[in-house]
Amino acid sequence: MSKKHGKNWDLIVAGGGASGMMAAIAAAESGAHVLLLEQKNCLGKKLSATGNGRCNFTNADMDLVHFYGNRELAGRALSRFSLEDTLSFFHRIGILPKQKNGYYYPHSGQAASVVRALETELRRKDVSVCTGEEVTEILPLPAGFRVNTGNNSYITAKLLLATGLFAAPKLGGGASMVRLIERLGHHFSEIVPALCGFCCEGADFAALAGVRTDGRITVYIDGEEAAQDSGELQFTDYGISGIPTFQVSRTASLALAEGKQVQASLDFLPELGVSGILEELQLRIRNCKGFETTEEGCNGLLPAKLLPVLIQKAGISRKTRMKELSDQEAGRLAETISDFTVDLVRARGYESAQVCAGGLDSAQIDPDTLESRLVPGLFFAGELLNVDGVCGGYNLQWAWSSGYLAGKSAAAEAGKGAV
Ligand SMILES: Cc1cc2nc3c(=O)[nH]c(=O)nc-3n(C[C@H](O)[C@H](O)[C@H](O)COP(=O)(O)OP(=O)(O)OC[C@H]3O[C@@H](n4cnc5c(N)ncnc54)[C@H](O)[C@@H]3O)c2cc1C
């Protein structure tokens, strides 16, 4: 019996983030009596921070290539709760969608309004919510579970864990639930930070910090090309960041965890190619007078803070006049602009990662229900499972789809609604 509520629950959902709130709503919609437990003092803390506070909650292009880990899990959950279902669900609870280049945001431009809409829907569906309740113990019973927190002990027929993984600990990420789940017999695959920047060597990053410029990043693992993306590249005092870096981060992060050599080649003018850059440099050499330094001669080509670093990396003295650049020096500079190679030393860590790659061993999960194959009545949703997406709303779409599927399945098993 739950001391606090004096009744048995059909379903307890642990974790009041994106997937947990969706799971609780889906289960309650089927008629289940649901209790949602969240360790923080409010629901959806991470969700409030998504999309730079604007919440990129899904994407017009739901091709499975945008998901990593176990694509079968992603595909099954998306077929139960699709992009269209997501848009109509959120519209129904008050979120008017706004699309920009395929990325969907709430029209309010505020992630907080998504959290508020979900909270209101939880109330409408009579879901009981307890915040400040960290699940610290899970005890399987002959028919159900005892769930202990620091304050209370609850009994439930079904249990759904939606507690996320390690990313963004200040917003709710943490390892404690992983240990509880392992005690129930489940295994996790290698977990690494993803959608994150990298600490790098091979350039003067203190001088480059703050530079943002469009370009292409190509990741090489042990010398083999492994991933590529384009967009706004960003330099920080520790290394590289920005959306294209995030998009290739999963591949790089896993390779680093395996002890492989990981390098990134940055192309700052991919639209020109080496020969086009060389032509541009030769034009400038012809047009300039004798007094301009190479840096002055390259003005307007790339951000001012980037130029001296490129010139130095190309082995050209800062004193060299643009007019005096030899063919070899101009060639080296063109090569450096199109292939600026840095060594990736380590991923930036969970504090600044948006998600984790890796998760629960999928062989131990039924993909049609997201129920544990080891512990009947135990369900999972969200980042705990081995699915992650690239930037663009895919991680939240996974949270909505997996939350819906697990919530409906748990309710059906509790004798409420159909799967
Ligand atoms: C800064 C940032 C920006 C992001 N922007 C986007 C974006 O724009 N679009 C996108 O698609 N994705 C984005 N993401 C990723 C997205 O937020 C996550 O993929 C998603 O929130 C995962 O949902 P979840 O429900 O699995 O986990 P979470 O949202 O992390 O929720 C888990 C919840 O469980 C709680 N919890 C943990 N342990 C316990 C316990 N023992 N007992 C009780 N409660 C517990 C936590 O406090 C937390 O509230 C972003 C992430 C970050 C950090």
Image (cartoon, rainbow, N blue to C red):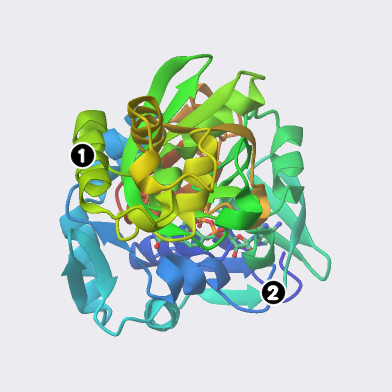
Instruction: Indicate whether 410 appears above or below 315.
Output: below
Q: Secondary structure at mark 2?
A: loop
Q: Which residue is drawn at the image coordinates 49% and 14% (left, top)?
A: 223
Q: Label 1 crowding class (10 Å Cα cut-off): few <14, some 14-19, many 20+?
A: few
Question: Ligand 1: does it lie within 8 Å of the C-beta at label 2?
Answer: no
Give the quarter of the figure containing the N terminus. bottom right
Crowd tier of the residue under label 2, counting other residues whose Cα lies within 10 Å: few below 14, some 14–19, many 20 or above: few
> Residue at horizontal 50%, vertical 60%?
20
- Of labels 1 and 2, the one closer to you: 1
Q: How many marks?
A: 2
Residue at (61, 18) in percent of width and height: 260
> Mark 2 is on which residue type?
Gly
Q: Position of residue 406 (x, y in %)?
A: 42, 48
Q: Quadrant of residue 3?
A: bottom right
Q: Position of residue 117 (x, y in %)?
A: 37, 81
**Amino acid type of disc 1?**
Asp
Is residue 82 or residue 284 the one in the foreground? 284
Q: Earlier in the sequence, mark 1 or mark 2?
A: 2
- Specify whether 82 is left or right of 380: left
269 left or right of 3? left
Mark 1 secondary-structure assignment: loop
Name the spot of residue 367 as percent of width and height, x first. Answer: 39, 32
- Quadrant containing the C terminus in the rendered view: top left
The residue wearing badge 2 is 6
Q: Is mark 1 within 8 Å of ligand 1?
A: no
- Residue 63: mark: 1
Q: CA distance from mark 1 to mark 2?
A: 46 Å
